[in-house]
Image: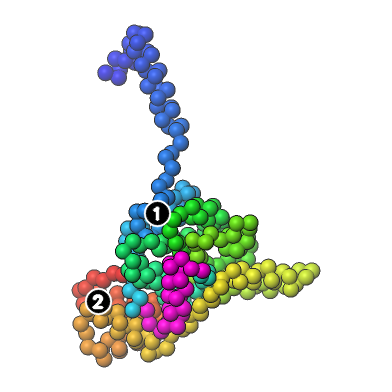
Amino acid sequence: MILEQLLSKDPIDILNRKLDIIAEILARSAPAPAPDNSLEITDVYVWQAELKWLQPVEKVNRVDMKLLKGIDRVRDILVENTTKFASGYSANNALLWGARGMGKSSLVKAVHAAINKLSDKSELKLIEIHREDIESLPQLMMLLRKQPFRIILFCDDLSFDSDDTSYKSLKAALDGGVEGRPGNVVFYATSNRRHLLPRDMIDNERSTAISPGEAVEEKVSLSDRFGLWLGFHKCSQDEYLAMVMGYASYFGIDIDKMELRKQSLEWATTRGSRSGRVAWQFIQDLAGSLGKSIEK
C-alpha cells in the first residue's frame, strides 16, 4: 500500500503524502507534556532536575524507627521539630552530621513515615534532591512554594569539593534571596562534615585572603542556615549488639543469642568498625546463610 502511494501520480495521493509528512514533523516538534507535579500520587518523591519532574517513589528504602539504636537524643529532637512542622508551626532546617553508617538518612525517612502514620491523609511529603542537583534548588523551591502540602526537602550525603561553588545556591535557597525559604518547606541534610566544606578549603581561604576572617565566614556560614545540628557518633559495642539483636528479632532470625553475639562481633572486627550499617550488613549475610531473604 505504501509502495503504491509512493509510485502513484494521483494528485490526491501526493497531497495526502505531504500532509502525512507535515503531521509527523509537527508531532515531533511539539513540546512534551508538562510533568505531573501535584504531589497527589504518594508521599515520597525524587526531584529529577533535568526533567523538572517530581518522580513518585513506589517503594521507599527505610527501616522502622524502633530499629534505630543509640541515637535516642537526636531522634527525639528531630521528631519534635518535624512534628511541629507537620502541624503547621515554625520549624528549623536540620543538618544531621557525623559518623558513617549511624542512621542519619534512615532517621529522616523513619521520622517522616512515623508522623504520616498518625494521619490518614499523608499530608507530609518527603522529596529527595540529589547532591549533584543542588544548583537547581531555587527552581525546586519555586515549584514547592505553590504546593498545599508540608514538605521535607531532603539531601543525603551533602558536601562540597574545594572548587565547587554550588553551595551558594543552597545558601540563597535556604535563607537568602528576596523570597527566602517557602513556609511549607523544611530542609534536612545529612553529611559526614559539620561544616559541609573540606577543611583544606577553609584553611586555603584563610591563608590567601586579604581579610581571612571574612573569607572563612563565607564558607562556614553555610552550616548556619541549619537551626538544628544533630551529631551522630561512633557506637559502642553494647549499642552495636543492640542493633544486631533488634534486627534479628524484627526479621524473625532464629539463632542462639550467644552465637549471634559471637558472629556479629567477628563481623565487626573484619570490617574494622561498628555502626548501624555494619549491623545491617551482618544481618543480611546471616539471613542468607540461614536461607532467608530480608529487605528494608
Instruction: Write the start and end of the magenta stretch as one range.
Output: 67-90
- 1 vs 2, front mark: 1
Instruction: Classify mark 1: helix, strand or loop.
Output: loop
Circle 2: is it few (<14), some (14-19), or many (20+) Cα within 10 Å?
some
Indicate whether 63 appears above or below 234.
Answer: above
265, above or below 278, in the image: below
Q: Earlier in the sequence, mark 1 or mark 2?
A: 1
Q: Quadrant of residue 104?
A: bottom left
Towards the viewer: 172 or 242: 172
Amino acid at pointer 1: Leu
Q: Is residue 290 left or right of residue 166?
A: left
Q: Is residue 201 visible?
A: no
Amino acid type of the residue that numbered disc 2 sits on in the rendered structure: Phe
Residue displayed at 43% across by 85% down: 235
Query: Which residue is most to the right?
Result: 210
Image quarter for residue 118?
A: bottom left
Q: Which residue is mark 1?
A: 39
Residue 245 x, y percent position in the rendering: 30, 84
Quadrant where the C terminus sits is bottom left
Q: Position of residue 100 (x, y in %)?
A: 46, 76
Q: Secondary structure at mark 2?
A: loop
Q: Is residue 247 left or right of residue 83?
A: left
Q: Which is the main secondary structure of the residues drawn in magenta?
A: helix
Q: Is residue 217 visible?
A: yes
Residue visible at 64% across and 70% down?
Answer: 221
Find out whether residue 70 is within the magenta segment: yes
Left or right: where does residue 122 sit relative to residue 235?
left
The percent position of residue 41, horizontal first and vertical second, equals 34, 54
Q: What residue is shown with label 2?
A: 251
Which numbered dot is residue 71?
A: none
